[in-house]
Amino acid sequence: MTQGFRRPSRRTFLKAAAASAAALVVGVDSRGVLATGSESAVFNPFVKIAADGTVTVVIKHFEMGQGVTTGLATLVAEELDASWDQIAFEFAPANDKVYANLFFGGHQGVGSSTSIANSFMQYREAGAAARQLLVKAAAQDWGVEDKDITIAEGVIAAVGRTGRFGEFAAAAASLPPPAAVTVKDAAHFRLIGRDRLPRKDSAAKTDGTAVFALDKRVPGMVSAVILRPPKFGAKLKTFDAGPAKAKGGFLQAFSLPEGKGVAVVASSTWSALEARNAITAEWDFSAAETRSTKQLADDHVSLLDQPQYQARQNGDRAVAEAAVRSAAKVVDAVFRLPYLAHAPMEPLNCVIEPKGDGIILHDGCQWPSLVKPVLAAALAIDPEKIEIRTLFAGGSFGRRVTTEADYQLEAALVFDRLGRKTPVKLVWSREDDITGGFYRPMAAHRVRIGLTADGTVMGWDHRLAVKSIVKGTVFEAPFAPNGIDPISVQGAADVPYAIPAFSVSLSDAASKVPVLWWRSEGHTHNAYAIEVAMDMAAAAAGIDPVLFRNKLLAQDSDDHRRMKAVLTLAAEKAGWSGKPVAGKGRGIAVHKSFGTYVAHVVDVADAGSGKVRIERVLCALDCGLVLNPDVVRAQMEGCIGFALGTVMRNAVTLAEGTVEQSNLHDYEPLRMAEMPPVEIHIMPSSLAPTGVGEPGVPSVGPALANAIFALDGRRVLELPMTASGIAFA
């Protein structure tokens, strides 16, 4: 996603708050007062303090396991000097005027690992503003100067007197907002950077009190599932629901607009699924995708010969081609990467219930600003009549953000058909999502690298073919005005390496298979091609892979210093020597994504019978200032497990247009017993925080591939690795 900081104006905040908080509003600013009350004082859109002293942090981004509820709460608690035990959180309402992602141009939503990065100063200033108001209220009550007041662990103190936040909350909220807000110097942090600070959502997720979208029930609710076409682009011709009527709990079935399937409504989700299984349907495949995986992959590779776009600024393809042609040594590699499913642990689902002449949507809603207008158009109602109540989500990896708000729209269509009086819970089964959802795009790459006789890079001609994610959507105009989808080339067109005569060319692949951003977006396939090709070039040059990369990171720039630093740290911590050891292999890869620099070292061993055993994965990263070290480590560990299972054996394949996988038995994530020992090393930094939910993914796969080459000389150019003949112990 493109980044551009935009602070909402004071007037915008005031108007939005007045609309959302009604008579409680007394003034508003991102640094000032929003509302007051006898039981609870709302100091700004992000901080509430109750009479009992509980500080509730209003979380503008949803929680899908990434730790944002803990991270944003930490920022407020730090600036307030609150006790961690008195901090609670709640999810913000859907209001993009107040709760916009500051990197997304006024949209409320989260993606591209921006939750903490865009909110860092916003939540710190909110906490600092609330603190200043509490100090002033206490000073006035005690007849002392503001400077005489101290706060520690939620206790306000001065001249032998102490008090709690709740005692001064109402008085503080009645004060005018501070003209200026001062945040702490990093030297005085108590919570930011503290290791093992307990996550704010762990207890509820452990004892079962956390409410996920799938848990949500409302009185009078019915359940719905959809019978979708077996091939992408097919349309419904006819269906017979007669056999479904014999299933217990079945209520009705009807076709969706534009032939997109059959909605099946029943008293429970299980009943709806059973009834759906009994329905027979006839489909029109005249406009459907009917190619199988091999043909799709071959068609992607064929596009590499005639690229459509020059995707790197100041990167002339003719110059790169000439440099490669004249080189003493040439590396030439074609990479094939498959479609990938998101497969979050919680399948897609939501509940819509009526509220007056509007609706309430209960959802693990990742991007309210996309969902609201879609539902408003479908139901022909004012978007302001749509209330979104965000619940916990059991993962996403990008799947919960589609421009058409696919599952929410289906729920709205069923709700409308039932007369808008009956609450509807719509659920996708895991089979629904794996066989008919959205996917990380298939991609093909060709990388040709020209080297001098002494191993210096002369030219790099990189071509890739991938289906655009943003074209044909509302994101096309702002994201791809020149025809180039930046997600297709991210991490390739902007790779930090100083490569002479460097060209990146793009072709848009066409298919009916729906594609979507996937954990780390385009970086996943681009980093794989670049870092494996980089290793191939180092081998051709006869230079150690770490030294080879360092030569291309020698400039005096932040990018080069930070990327080289994590590469060096990873090599040092891994005990990198570059010397081969019989029966062992070690590979390295480094990549920058979402402002974060990550290097991985993977150790593998010969397990006998031609199998490879992964013995260790080491990760070094620079993500700027670290709020919660344990959350960062957890995210890196999760990225490593997620990436390993994917590159080892995951692929969504098609047979004449029909997806062949259906669940986790044939789209298998890494199992706990397969997870190797992992080491995480975090670079200390005082720079603004960057993302961690996704940047730990891209360099895992190429590091493993490079380790396999070091083990037995096999280059893995096609993923998953099982498709290249690699077997794992």
Image: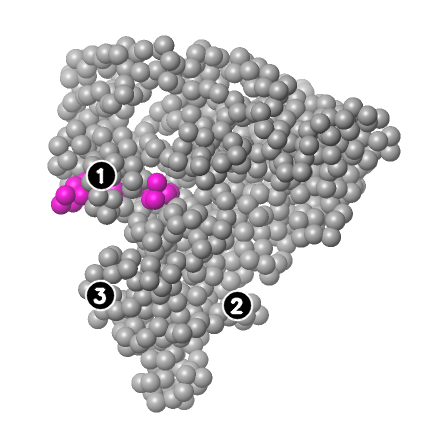
Q: Which mark identifies residue 192?
A: none
Residue drawn 72% across the image and 23% down it: 332
**Tag in front: 1 or 2:** 1
**Residue 365 in magenta stretch:** yes
Residue drawn 62% across the image and 40% down it: 494
Extreme-right residue of the structure: 453
Q: Amino acid at mark 2?
A: Phe
In which image quadrant can residue 364 be found?
Answer: top left
Residue drawn 18% across the image and 43% down it: 358
* Magenta residues, start to end: 352-370
Which tag, 1 or 3, sits closer to the chain's start? 3
Q: Is residue 222 above or below residue 563?
A: above
Please provide percent x and percent y for residue 686: 60, 61
Which tag, 1 or 2, sits closer to the chain's start? 2
Residue drawn 14% across the image and 30% down it: 418
**Tag in front: 1 or 3:** 3
CA neighbours of label 2 inside 10 A, class few (<14), some (14 to 19), many (20+): some
Q: Which residue is mark 2?
A: 189
Cα distance, mark 1 to mark 3?
A: 28 Å
Left or right: residue 518 compared with residue 707:
left
Q: Which mark identifies residue 352?
A: 1
Q: Is residue 15 above or below residue 653?
A: below
Please provide percent x and percent y for residue 645: 54, 31
Cα distance, mark 3 to mark 2?
A: 33 Å
Q: Amino acid at mark 3?
A: Leu
CA neighbours of label 1 inside 10 A, class few (<14), some (14 to 19), many (20+): many
* Front one among 670 and 334: 334
